[in-house]
Amino acid sequence: MDTEEVTASAAGDGRPADAAPRYLSGFGNEHSSEAEPGALPVGRNSPQRAPLGLYAEQLSGTAFTEPRAHNRRTWLYRARPSAAHPPFHRIGNGSLRGAPFEETEPDPNRMRWDPLPEPPAGTDFVAGLWTLGGNGDARLRSGMAIHLYHANSPMTDRVFGDSDGELLLVPERGALRLCTELGVLVAAPGQVALIPRGVRFRVELPDGEARGYVCENYGQPFTLPELGPIGANGLANPRDFLAPTAAPEESEGPVEVVNKFCGRLWAAEYAHSPLDVVAWHGTHVPYLYDLRRFNVLGTISYDHPDPSLFTVLTSPSELPGQAGVDFVVFAPRWLVGEDTFRPPYFHRNVMTEYMGLVEGAYDAKAEGFRPGGGSLHNMMSAHGPDRATFDRASAAELRPQRVDDGLAFMFETRWPVTLTAAATDAPHRQRHYDQVWQGLERHHSPKRP
Ligand SMILES: [Fe+2]
């Protein structure tokens, strides 16, 4: 696929083009970018002397020997090598936790939470991370964690990197300006951004405050799902994924570099900004995706398709078709199914579902599920429409109906999610969520001979 430069305004973030970062279009591409002409070596990765006095450094997101289709690595050409730092020391984790999750017993109950409360003034993105739960083990590079964030202060002289996995950021309130080693991405509500494992970044808050969700994926990097009989196009189209262009920060230190390593936070004082990459090329790159560009497919005859049809990104496991975690979006769409119960049906699934809401309402829950909140339906827990939704949808006249009053998403994972103590005990947890399914009366009367 060709690399195509686009501006953020073309990407739809609403900012003036002259203030917007420039992006490279395409998913999984071997992208390249240089902030200064001639900074990128030609014909080799590690010449005897890299151009312009830069240091060459490879950042690998997969093992050297993984198949080409999976392999992720990027060559960085930077003012100082990342290796130039003193020892890392432990710092407090705040409300951030990592797998394995052993603070509470796995709980089969259905759970729902209101949005995170307001953080104290001066809370930056890292300090504003709050872990709900997860599964697997970061030390085994398997499983996932669900975090929420609520921040009201930009990161200054502080940079974060996650050795444990990649971070899929889902803004719900306020944009995130992500200053990464490879350049700048601006992610507003309705868009998602991915920071690959180990890529360092700083978060600024253009709107002064930001709130949202994070899927931390310890397993194989997210990729696009196979399309099978859908054909060559559809769902999330590769050209709509946008990578940044090189934007080095030349500031001299001190900069606190925070490293999440096996669930714990460590920090080292760098004497220079680690975001000093002048040129790069590779496949291990951050990217931005606008969920409004998702090509929603669904029935044009009858029945509600399984929501796997709404998969944006998937992290495959060793079992074909069984994802470590899927990112699924319920985007605006038309419902036209004939003789069909159109909202999501009642179900019990082997996969575990965490749902969040970016805006509006979700068509299976009439109330109680708020933007910034979330629900957890663990392995085999029974759930589906609430009574009000069931009654309405069972009686509705089945004309073509546009569902465009909300943007919900799901992190769906192969293993049950165990909560943190903070999530279990949270004052903003809804203690009476089960009542959603109260009042679903018996309508069937057995016909006796
Ligand atoms: Fe579900």
Image (spheres, grey):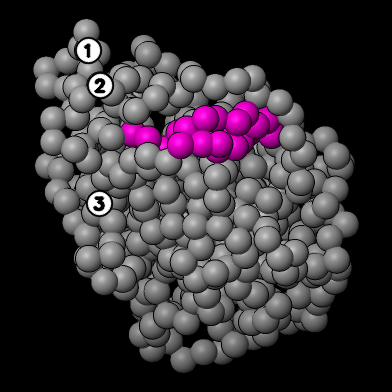
Graded by Cα atoms within 10 Å as few (under 14), some (14 to 19) or many (20 or more), the crowding at tag 1 reads few
Q: Is residue 445 visible?
A: no
Instruction: Give the CA separation, mark 2 to mark 3.
Output: 26 Å
Picture residue at 13% right of the left edge, 30% below the top: 38
The residue that label 3 is drawn on is 23
Eyeballing the image, is 427 above or below 417? below
The residue that label 2 is drawn on is 53
Q: Mark 1 and mark 2 in contact? Answer it, CB < 8 Å.
A: yes
Kind of residue at disc 1: Arg
Eyeballing the image, is 156 above or below 366? above
Q: Tell me which secondary structure the magenta stretch mostly adopts.
A: strand
Eyeballing the image, is 44 above or below 397? above
Q: Does the magenta-highlighted stretch encompass residue 162? A: no
| Camera-side residue of 418 and 174 | 174
Q: Position of residue 291 (x, y in %)?
A: 38, 63
Q: Which residues are magenta?
A: 252-277
Left or right relative to 393: residue 350? right
Of callouts 2 and 3, the N-terminal one: 3
